[in-house]
Amino acid sequence: MSLVKKTAEYKIVKRKDDRYAVTTLAGNPINGEEKAKILAAEELIKLTAPRPAEEEAPAEDEAAAE
């Protein structure tokens, strides 16, 4: 693994499979949304907005009305 960036709070390393690992300076891993926010802030990844959920209720109401 190669060190990409080290800050006062965490360090970012690039793994052999071209993914990023974020750990605290104590060596504890950071995962989930917190990891995604850190990588996006460092411009290492791009986040896309989630798609709006389609409502299935109107389609069911139309079928019930017939």
Image (cartoon, grey):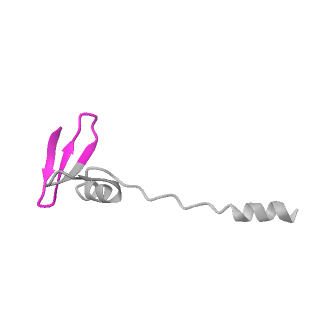
Q: Residue at x 80, y 63 (%)?
A: 62
Relative image position of residue 11 (x, y in whole percent): 16, 52
Residue 62 vs 46, above or below: the answer is below
Residue 61 placement, left or right of 11: right
Residue farthest toward the top in the current orientation of the protein:
16
Q: In the rendered view of the protein, which quadrant contains the C terminus?
A: bottom right
Q: Which residues are magenta?
A: 1-21
User: Toward which corner of the image does residue 25 lie, by quadrant?
Assistant: bottom left
Q: In the rendered view of the protein, which quadrant contains the N terminus?
A: top left
Q: Residue at x 30, y 59 (%)?
A: 34
Depth order, front residue of 3/41 = 3
Residue farthest toward the right in the current orientation of the protein:
66
Depth order, front residue of 52/37 = 37
Indicate whether residue 10 is drawn in magenta: yes
Relative image position of residue 8 (x, y in whole percent): 11, 61
Q: Residue at x 26, y 50 (%)?
A: 44
Residue 36 placement, left or right of 2: right
Residue 61 vs 2, above or below: the answer is below
Q: Residue at x 73, y 65 (%)?
A: 58
Residue 62 placement, left or right of 7: right
Residue 10 placement, left or right of 33: left
Indicate whether residue 13 is drawn in magenta: yes
Relative image position of residue 42 (x, y in whole percent): 22, 56
Q: How many marks?
A: 0
